[in-house]
Image (cartoon, coloured by chain):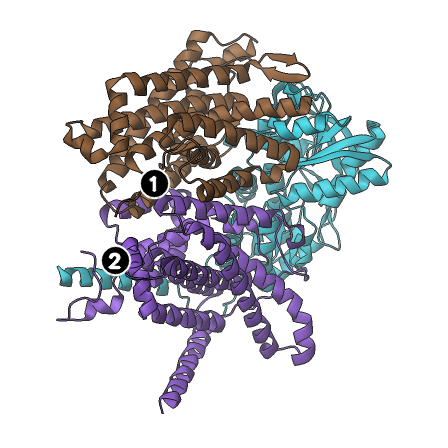
Chain colours: A brown, B purple, C cyan
Amino acid sequence: MTQFLQQLINGLSLGSIYALIALGYTMVYGILKLINFAHGEVFMVGAYTGYYAAGSLGVATFEARHQSFPLYLALLVLIAAMAAAALLGVAIEFLAYRPVRSAPRLTPLITAIGVSLFLQNAGMLLFSPNPQRYPAILSEVRFEVFGVIVTNIKLTIFAVALCLMLGLHLFVQKTWTGRAMRALSFNIDAAKLMGIDTNRVIRSTFAIGSALAAAGGILFGLDQITINPLMGVLTGLKAFVAAVLGGIGSIPGAVVGGLLIGLAEQLTAGYLSPEYRDAITFVILILILLLKPEGLLGVVRVEKV
Amino acid sequence: MRAVIRIASAGAVLLVIYGLSFGVELGFTEYVQRIVLLAGINIILAVGLNLINGTTGQFSIGHAGFMAVGAYGAAFVGVKLAAPIHSVLGPGALANGVIFNLALLAGAFFAGISGLIVGMPSLRLRGDYLAVVTLGFGEIIRILFNNAAFLGSATGYFGDDPSGLPAYTTFFWVFAWVSAIVALIHNLTFSQTGRSLTAIREDEIAAEAMATPTTRLKVTAFAISAATAGIAGGLFAHMQAGVRPEDFRFEKSVDMIVMIIIGGLGSISGAIIGGIFVAASLELMRDLQQYRLVLYALLLVIIMIVRPQGLLGTGELYQLFRRGKPAKRGEGA
Amino acid sequence: MQILRRTLICGLCAAALSGAISCKKPAPDGGPTGSAAGSAEIVVGHYASMTGSTAHFGQDTDRGIRMAIEEANAKGGVLGKKLKLVTLDTRGDSAEAANAVSRLIDVEKVSAVLGEVASSLSLAGGRVAQRRKIPMISPTSTNPKVTEVGDYIFRVCFIDPFQGKVMATFARKNLNFSKVAILKDVKNDYSIGLAAAFQKAFTELGGTIAAEQSYSQGDTDFSAQVTAIRGTGAQALFVPGYYSEVGSIARTADRLGLKVPLLGGDGWDSPDLFKIGGDAINGSYFSDHFAPDVATDKAKAFVANFGAKYGQPPTGLGALGYEAALVLIDSIRRAGKDDPTAIRDAIAATKDFEGVTGKITIDAQRNAQKSAVVLKVEGGKAKFEASIAP
């Protein structure tokens, strides 16, 4: 039983990170009907920005003296990473996606794949292909509850993910830009006719999605101990599946999807075989697209001729 | 009389192929020979993928999986058939040829079946979703091979001989299969079936309204495309010491996509050009090896932004030289 | 517009064709291989994964080889000629590996080849080298099949069956463990081979394997596997993988309360092991080629020079790359001429060669007979614990 609970906790924390990344996918797809393959790489860049930011703020000296990194500096690192990722996301949108926005569906898809590959390999050149140990922005403290080991990092993941998701929900429901985002995802042409500056809203969508992914990146690094330039490939794909599972275009769907994928992966690895942990995500994708393509929380869209 | 002409021209083609392969083997170093072989394999991959991605407009980005099925299938069958056929036909080129082609056909068969299995559920989906599902299937196939103990798991399948799989792949067979497949796909594309496929690409709902059996055609085209990838896989396997799951990662599917994009989605001659280009450029860009993958990806993005129809669009190479006559299909200005 | 486009396309095709044809060499057949006796340099090739997901392995090995070549050249070269090293990237792909060796032989005209790190890539490249009769030395491929390809293929490292036996013996006899769990990397034939060898030897010595779990190279999350092993009562965890994952595994085990020593092989050898593993990796043991603290003078000099030249200490791969190059250079010297067959014979005759990773003798199966050392990780450093001869 303790093993099951342990796998559960691990699965939920991983799932929260997937949820943060999935939010970016779902928001962009909702508006542009485009799978932003490069989102996984934005996640990676966010993690690396955190790595370098923490380094330049002297995290190594704190580690050497066995002191914990001050909270205000940790927040600074988080903000720096989120800002950098937001900039990157907006840049990608402006340089690569906007020129092909009106092209047939295949073109932006291939462009997205190209951007993703470019960032992966540029990352390998710039950041070195070796895995790097993630700095202790948060010092690790362990608790044992009923034989299940929980670290403060896992609790932080839950807390941060929850806060960010709530923040996003409020943003989308209460603010003007949020409402504009929802309008665009319903019908982009009508929104344009209503006088909404679609380019600005799309830019904001990319920025917010990327910032969330960066937060996920830092949390991922803290939890998974190492980062490497290819970390965004599989994780990004799984987060995308999570978005589809929950219902692409639906924000609560992305959260639910993320948690479910994280759980499925962890339980498969623990009880079936670790070799199939990646395959299970794809199996879930195929099943959901065959059985309920609009996702668990999604809305069926009728195709009119 | 028609039959005589047909047989004679087939014979002539075979002679040309034999002559070409003889010439290449004499005239080029082994290093260049390998590139030519890889270019041939690429052509088969590109032309096959073009049938489903270009002509039918259904985007598959997991074709490396079918190549893997073909490679493993051909390797396995080839190894198992070697003893029985050698005992009947003796050692030597005839027996090798028989074994090799039977193995290739077996590989193509397995690949075609997996194409059916993947295609039947997936082709109900459209656009982006289809792409991701095919990607998923491609990865699942690779993971399955990675865990198949009787096929060597991650180390790969090297047959029973310590020096690896027999090197059946020669120029003659590669040129022969390239010719056969290009002819097959060309005839298919310009037949009535091919026109129906193009109709599906242009407007699927309208095609359906015109009583075209869209799902059946899509799945059939997908299976054929998978089978050709399987042939390419079988040819590839017998150039290597063994078959590894790592050789069929997503990167391979991306290579295939680049091939058909460069030439132009929907153009057979474009696919051929793309296939040759990718094989040659990987080697010609070797001096930039550190930046090779980065430049490759950048090239993909730039092509999409600047000239998404690639070199030839949906037209064919020979249409460029037709003066006065209007182009058969849109040349993609 | 039409004419312009047509011309452009024709021009591109012509350019591509001429590019392809320009690769044609005047030689009528496969071409004579190896440098002509009158050329001023001896060309040596190295094929490795310099890009792709295993890029750091290839780059490490290359640094070791490069250093050996440069040191030899500084002393005047070999047979009165300078050595030239050409390194080609395999991108971790077996087709590329074969291409790279083919290009080294046909275009660069090498007399010998070094490579690769991964056994499956060595198999791919080895086949080409064997067919063209160019000697090949693999620095680090441990799968027994590699040297079975043919009599031109050698290696300077021990093979998996031996290394597995080393750790199994150490675990059973020195540490008195009777129940050990295995956590192997299934994407990595080195790890699979070593795990199998360990299991065989350990059970033959009367021990039992408590559990066998697996992961894939590149994974970052090991909590599922560690959790599963936690309840089995294993006294130690054998992790025959690469340092990049082993460090994380140690930390995960520590975090989840699995407080047993880890055991491993030479894939652990890297300063990153301590960087990633931190305190969690202390008290673990692994087999390796040489111990930095009881190293011979030659080894100490190597470590110091490597650090000075590249700004980072050498990993085991760097040391083995250096070793392979040294053996090759020595063999060229003993062969007396820049001829691939003569070099091949000289490599096969290598006996008690004093390298940086111990005394090497190439046996009849073209594998290296050398002792292994077991190192203990303490205080962020690896220290000599025991030495085990074949």
Give residue A112's mark: 1
Amino acid on which the number 2 mark rests in the picture = Gly
Give residue B313's mark: 2
Residue B110 rendering spot, x and y as whole percentages: 54, 61
Q: Is residue B265 visible?
A: no
- The residue most toward the bottom is B1
From what the image shows, is residue A130 above or below residue A75? Answer: below
Q: Is residue C76 visible?
A: yes
Q: Are marks 1 and 2 on the same chain?
A: no
Residue C91 rendering spot, x and y as whole percentages: 48, 47
Residue drawn at (56%, 34%) of the image: C219
The chain that hosts pointer 1 is A
From what the image shows, is residue C232 above or below residue B108? Answer: above
From what the image shows, is residue C255 above or below residue B220? Answer: above
Q: Secondary structure at mark 1?
A: helix
- Snapshot quadrant of residue B198: bottom left
Residue B160 relative to residue A57: left or right: right
Badges 1 and 2: C-beta atoms under 8 Å apart?
Answer: no
Name the residue nearer the viewer: B23 or A233: A233
Residue drawn at (59%, 57%) of the image: B242
Name the residue nearer the viewer: B180 or B38: B180
- How far apart are the alpha carbons under marks 1 and 2? 20 Å
Number of other residues with Cα within 10 Å of mark 2, as a class: few under 14, some 14 to 19, many 20 or more: many
- Snapshot quadrant of residue C364: bottom right
Residue A45 rendering spot, x and y as whole percentages: 40, 28
Residue A87 rendering spot, x and y as whole percentages: 30, 25
Amino acid on which the number 1 mark rests in the picture = Ala
Number of other residues with Cα within 10 Å of mark 1, as a class: few under 14, some 14 to 19, many 20 or more: many
